[in-house]
């Protein structure tokens, strides 16, 4: 217990002293995960909304597939991305393997199904509520997508939060395609795994504290936004 308290004290010193290596790892993690979530949102939100309002043959099968892809094993994603980006792979000429870009690609593959599925659920609920009103105004199904996405923007923040949580906490895929190279592709999760195996618990704990703080603060912000929106809605009503 005393050893743990000492390591935790060292961890807090690393955080509060602005340790250069520590914050380099944190900033790279944030950069990779934020870019991955933004790209996944650009791809997943329109797709999820289209699945919610669209009617086409095979729609139910596509929805089942998207839901199934939410549980993609990260190591399998890492393997597939690795094979695509390796020298003998179809994208090997781009020389992206063991770069932050490769890590972003892996995270996009993991996060896009999550955002797509959660967006579909949100927009489908809103569409059931507003469909008749939108049709009476002459708005087609596809034309209603931007309106429904905007109306459900606060609920969709939860989808983005879920995607960010999956991305920032990822280990298997990013270590396979990034290589955990110091000052190049070393992010929080891979560093925690490495430093724990080396017995450097202070750095691992410091990164763990920051990860938890990020998760709690982002969840709190989204909850406050939703709560504020509900209060404003009651006032307007």
Image (cartoon, rainbow, N blue to C red):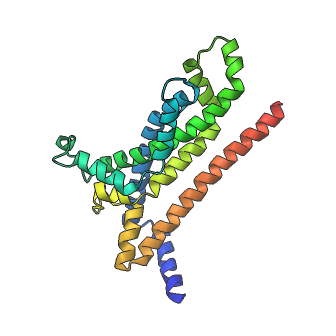
Q: Position of 136 compared to 190: left or right?
A: right
Q: Is residue 13 above or below residue 170?
A: below
Residue depicted at 41% across the width and 62% down the height: 188
Query: x, y (%) of residue 122?
Result: 62, 36
Q: Position of 145 compared to 20: left or right?
A: right
In the image, 105 versus 110, the foreground residue is 110
What is the total number of numbered labels drawn onto the structure image? 0
Kindly indicate the quadrant of the structure image that contains residue 24. Answer: bottom left
Picture quarter with the C terminus: top right
Q: Which residue appears farthest toward the bottom when viewing the image?
A: 2
Q: Position of 89 compared to 75: left or right?
A: left
In the image, 112 versus 65, the foreground residue is 65
Q: Which residue appears farthest toward the top when viewing the image?
A: 138
Kindly indicate the quadrant of the structure image that contains residue 181. Answer: bottom left
Q: Is residue 111 above or below residue 75?
A: above
Q: Position of 112 compared to 227: left or right?
A: left
Residue depicted at 30% across the width and 62% down the height: 180
Query: x, y (%) of residue 90?
Result: 20, 40
Q: Can residue 17 be seen in this view?
A: no
Q: Is residue 45 above or below residue 53?
A: below
Query: x, y (%) of residue 81?
Result: 30, 48
Residue depicted at 66% across the width and 33% down the height: 125
Q: In this view, does 40 lie above or below 150?
A: below
Residue depicted at 42% across the width and 38% down the height: 39
Q: Is residue 224 visible?
A: yes
Query: x, y (%) of residue 45?
Result: 51, 34
Picture quarter with the N terminus: bottom right
């Amino acid at each position: 217990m005393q050893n743990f308290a000492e390591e935790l004290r060292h961890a807090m010193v690393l955080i509060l002293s602005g340790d250069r290596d520590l914050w380099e790892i944190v900033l790279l993690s944030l950069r990779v995960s934020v870019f991955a979530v933004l790209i996944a949102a650009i791809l997943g939100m329109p797709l999820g909304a289209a699945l919610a309002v669209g009617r086409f043959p095979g729609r139910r099968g596509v929805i089942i597939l998207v839901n199934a892809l939410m549980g993609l094993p990260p190591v399998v994603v890492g393997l597939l991305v690795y094979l695509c980006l390796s020298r003998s792979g179809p994208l090997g000429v781009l020389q992206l393997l063991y770069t932050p870009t490769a890590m972003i690609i892996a995270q996009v593959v993991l996060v896009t199904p999550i955002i797509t599925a959660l967006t579909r659920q949100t927009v489908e609920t809103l569409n059931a509520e507003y469909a008749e009103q939108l049709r009476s105004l002459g708005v087609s199904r596809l034309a209603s997508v931007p309106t429904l996405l905007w109306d459900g923007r606060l609920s969709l923040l939860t989808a983005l939060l879920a995607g960010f949580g999956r991305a920032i906490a990822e280990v298997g895929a990013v270590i396979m395609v990034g290589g955990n190279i110091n000052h190049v592709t070393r992010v929080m999760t891979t560093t925690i795994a490495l430093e724990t195996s080396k017995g450097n618990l202070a750095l691992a704990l410091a990164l763990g504290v920051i990860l938890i703080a990020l998760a709690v603060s982002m969840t709190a912000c989204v909850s406050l936004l939703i709560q504020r929106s509900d209060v404003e809605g009651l006032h307007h009503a």
